[in-house]
Image: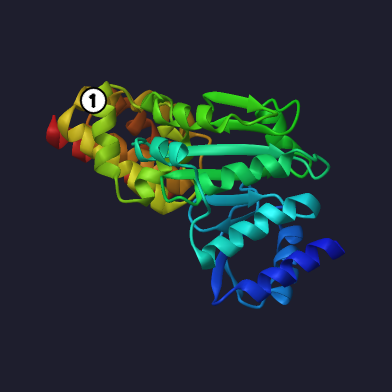
Amino acid sequence: MLTESDKRQLHQLNQTLTGEIKIGLTAAGHPQGQLFREFCDHLVQLVPNIKIMVEDGSTRQPPEIQIADGLRYQAIPSGLEMQPFAEALAALDSGPLQISASILTGLEQNELPATLTAFISPHCTFCPQVIRQLIPLAMAEAGIRLIVIDATLFPELAQRHQIQSVPTILLDEQFRWTGSVPLEEIVDAIRTRNPALLSAASLESFLKEGQASHLAAMMLDTHEIFPAFYDLLIHDKWPVRLGAMVVIEEIAGKDPALASAAIDPLWEHFEHVPDQIKGDILYLFGEVGDTKTIPWLQGVVAGEYDHEVKEAAREALDKISGDW
């Protein structure tokens, strides 16, 4: 898996580290997860100061290596890709990577989290240079997340995003760059985006940083439930769903009509999600209090659903009836 050149670079990294650094690994259940576990095993053998923090994942979630909060590798760095990866690891110990003054000024003016997705391939000679340019943005603690994806390792992701060549950089599904990366242009696009078009990953950043109220305020200001927000309401992970539910509850308390706009999209997902998420959807129906959901809730109570799902429907009916 690792070339001799890779091993030399990691040996040099080991000599430069002054203390322990921690990185994350999410690999549970996915078919490619074993490759990531083996890579991390080799990594800690060569660099003992690296500690791997294993996190739970789902079979639907691609395995990834997490470096700090902002950098995630859904790729196994090797060959030319090893240098930017090793530099990112070194930055955990030595401090932020260098950024030009003009780029730093643009980052300081940004008020929204951003997710950059970079598709690469192991045989692309230009990809490592692009990743090396982008990594400092993700490690500058400016609310920017960079996800590096090996398009050959995860062809389903490349197909979903219609990737025809590498490197291709996506910003919140709104902007796309292929080949040369105009860094100033990317930072300017980050700074001037429409918040309603933020990706689910960027919206999730608000919740992770305890900014649910700020996210609710943004949607109240624009009188719109952001399209990608629904992905958070049916997210696999309970903490993410909980944060998203708090947002809807806050919106419902200030603008019930806006909160009601979430009802139809959630009901469309209802039959396709696990029982626990079904229960959360029904709970939100009760909190929103829109009487249009009463026939749906009655149908759940009378239908062939899990006991806890039915109980959630009954509680939602009681809440709506009490508010009505």
- Callout 1 crowding tier (Cα within 10 Å): few <14, some 14–19, many ≥20: few
Q: Secondary structure at mark 1?
A: helix
Quadrant hosting residue 265: top left
Quadrant hosting residue 10: bottom right
Residue at horizontal 62 percent and vertical 26 percent from the top? 177
In the image: residue 99, left or right of residue 42:
left
Place of residue 244 in the rendered image (x, y in percent of width and height, measured from the top left): 35, 42
In the image: residue 17, left or right of residue 226:
right
Image quadrant where one finds the N terminus = bottom right
- The residue labelled by disc 1 is 221
Whether residue 172 is visible: no
Image quadrant where one finds the C terminus = top left
Quadrant hosting residue 285: top left
Amino acid type indicated by mark 1: Asp
In the image: residue 219, left or right of residue 270:
left
Place of residue 124 in the rendered image (x, y in percent of width and height, measured from the top left): 80, 39
Place of residue 282 in the rendered image (x, y in percent of width and height, measured from the top left): 34, 39
Residue at horizontal 76 percent and vertical 59 percent from the top? 35
